[in-house]
Amino acid sequence: MDTIILYLVWIITAILLVIFIRRKNLIKAQVSFLFMQVPTWLFGTLVVKGRLIEYPVGFLSVVYKASFTFEFFVFPAISAIFNVHFPREKSWFIKTIYTLSFPTIMTIIEIFLEKRTDLIKYINWTWYMSFLSITITLLLSYWYYLWFFKKIKKMYAEDL
């Protein structure tokens, strides 16, 4: 059953990308996606090596003890959607609700998976550590996204 859930997660994530990432935002989404793979890989490896979380079932679990699905596909995809649709022109209240909604939904799903499957097991970890780390990592990704595209815009402006 856990492997079926993993396949469903890949399918659902791919569908979310198709729905929320339009052609005009494809490069922005790709930059966000690729950037997010770096901190999630690093943080995921440290969490597993530190015996805080265990992933008993997963793709490539023989060679990679952290969650390949989450760190290399799901979280980068969510980050791409988060960054591309961030409500930059809205009030701080809307920005705060938007920012907190992503880690809230992801943490609720993680808690469900931790309690009902063998996909993730907390050893010395808690849901609020997930919430906090997801929030910080999403914000880090967004700040990189802003910085990167500001640099690109400046570079193209200098070429004109």
Image (cartoon, helix red, strand yellow):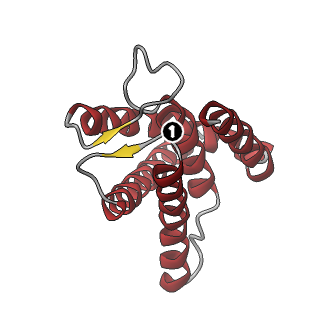
Q: Residue at x 42, y 31 (%)?
A: 56
Q: Residue at x 71, y 39 (%)?
A: 8
Residue 143 rendering spot, x and y as whole percentages:
41, 55
Quarter the N terminus occupies? top right
Residue 20 rendering spot, x and y as whole percentages:
74, 53
Task: Give the residue number, with chain letter if any, for mark 1.
Answer: 70
Residue 91 rendering spot, x and y as whole percentages:
54, 84
Quadrant of res 129: bottom left
Label 1 neighbour load within 10 Å: few <14, some 14-19, many 20+: many
Furthest residue in direction top, as rendered:
63
Q: Residue at x 59, y 75 (%)?
A: 89
Q: Residue at x 57, y 35 (%)?
A: 73
Is residue 157 something one can see in this rendering?
yes
Q: Is residue 45 left or right of residue 106?
A: left
Given residues 39 and 105, the one toward you in this image is 105
Is residue 159 something one can see in this rendering?
no
